Amino acid sequence: MSMLSSSPASPAHPAAATVGAGLHASPAVRRAIDTIVDEIAAHSAKVTDTRGPLPGLKEEYDALMARAAAVRGRALLYPYLGSGVGNRGLVELADGSVKWDMICGIGVNFFGHSDADLARASLEAGLDDVNKHGNLSSNFEAYAFVETLLKEAARHSRLKHGYVATSGAMANENALKVCMQKTGGTRVLAFKDCFMGRSLTMLAVGDNHVGREGLPINTHVDYMPFFDPIAADRMGKSRFIDMCLWHLDQYVTRYPGQHACFIFELVQGEGGFNVGDRDYFKTLMDYCRSKKIAIWDDEIQTFGRLPRMFAYEQYDLGDYVDVFCVGKMTQGCVTAFTEEYAPKAGLLSGTFTGEGSSFRIGRRVIERLRDGDFYGDQGAFARHHAIFREQAKALIAKRPEWFPAVPAVGDLVGGMMRFTPYGGDKAKITAAARAIFDEGVILFSCGHGPYHVRMLPPLPVMHESDWPRVFACIERGMAKV
Ligand SMILES: Cc1ncc(COP(=O)(O)O)c(C=O)c1O
């Protein structure tokens, strides 16, 4: 009998007498799944430390990379092609090399690699007749997933319903439609440096000119400053907040009744892991409420990885949220809204809204986050963050020449980790990320200047003792730049 046989991811089949329920309960199927999960665990256990490519595989790997580049018409940004197996934060690539994955597909694989429980969830979902769910072909899996999310959200928000979508950008598109339909507005308020995804409209809303080169701007966006701790310190926080409120009022007075929503990314991801401030957010949200401008909270990057499950809980602002989006680590993406914001029939739909396996895995991710010892000031995520900071500060103390000017470790939270070498110079940080990759750690950058080294590690499966091993690779890589 399998060590991993008790599946908390029970099928979402409500009717036990159906043939479908019979398939899921079949002893032969259960045994087969147990066997596969045990094999995954046994193979995963062979991945124990970083290593270079296996003899003879480098050429094959380079050939695969060239084929992938030919398909795309452009070389891969990162030389990452997985073998299909890893172990917690370690991942094996197709050339046999093993690396610490400290970016996890930009925050997607929060439970790391070859997690037995999630592998089981995926296998169970694979039994179903449809994998792609959509408006006319959906098993209960999608609803079980959103129901689990909404149950957690109900603790500290008014969010009541949710629609699934295939990507964060699509969930955001749905959120924008919900806000526009409810308020009748067409303009959008957003923070400088926000990122919303890569659809045409989300690129127009997001504040990064690079990704929208040559594209039309199809939505009117009025940008507000994000909370700036340096300016707030220099001029006094309440003066900073008053100044920004005046700025917001100017926009709303100039375009009366035209703003559909204000998009809040409470901790900015792509824009540089910038941390906000409750008083600042609350002042802006109070203003939006008074003007009937929807408050839309994009938690696609932050969800799950802060010291509270929801970023709005971190800032105690849940009551303000009208519309909310999640994606990345939840695998399925969701647009959630309050009763008041429920859209009219036909506004949200799609041939594909996601995959049964994504929904099943997403449900398990939320359940495990809920049931684990992760959150709170003494929780595992806060502890990991403290160790990350200790390690980063030790590196800065040891090699101060790599860390001039810009504050080298910001005041951050939970599993959104950044440090800033080379004064935030983009070219040097990109070169460092590549050298660190070669030394065994996969990480990325964020920000629009200064740039930062960005990490979204698989915190639930990391051990505190992993951090010195990760930082040893980082130091070796940086020494090569
Ligand atoms: C805050 C935020 N919103 C939206 C998105 C877009 O999500 P996706 O890439 O799944 O479309 C991202 C992706 O990085 C994000 O960080």
Image (spheres, helix red, strand yellow):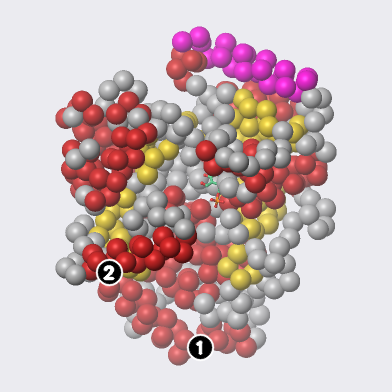
For label 2, the SS is helix
Query: Is residue 101 inside the magenta stretch?
Result: no
Q: How many other residues sit within 10 Å of disc 2, few (<14), some (14-19) or many (≥20)?
A: few
The x and y percentages for residue 327 are 55, 52
Give the residue pinned by disc 1.
26
What number is the disc on residue 60? 2
For label 1, the SS is loop
Is the residue indicated by label 1 positioned so its CB lies within 8 Å of ligand 1?
Answer: no
* Amino acid of disc 1: Ser
Using the image as rendered, state which of residue 123 and residue 428 is in the foreground: 428
The x and y percentages for residue 134 are 68, 68
Question: Residue placed at 73% from the left, 60% from the top?
Answer: 349
Query: Is residue 248 inside the magenta stretch?
Result: yes
The quadrant in which the N terminus is found is: bottom left
The x and y percentages for residue 29 are 47, 86
Query: Magenta residues?
Result: 234-254
The quadrant in which the C terminus is found is: top left
User: In this rendering, which labeled residue sits more in front, label 1 or label 2?
Assistant: 2
Question: Residue placed at 45% from the left, 42% from the top?
Answer: 306
User: Does residue 375 appear to the left or right of 245 in the view shown?
Assistant: left
Residue 214, compared with residue 22, is above or below; it is above
Q: How many other residues sit within 10 Å of disc 1, few (<14), some (14-19) or many (≥20)?
A: few
**Overall secondary structure of the magenta section:** helix
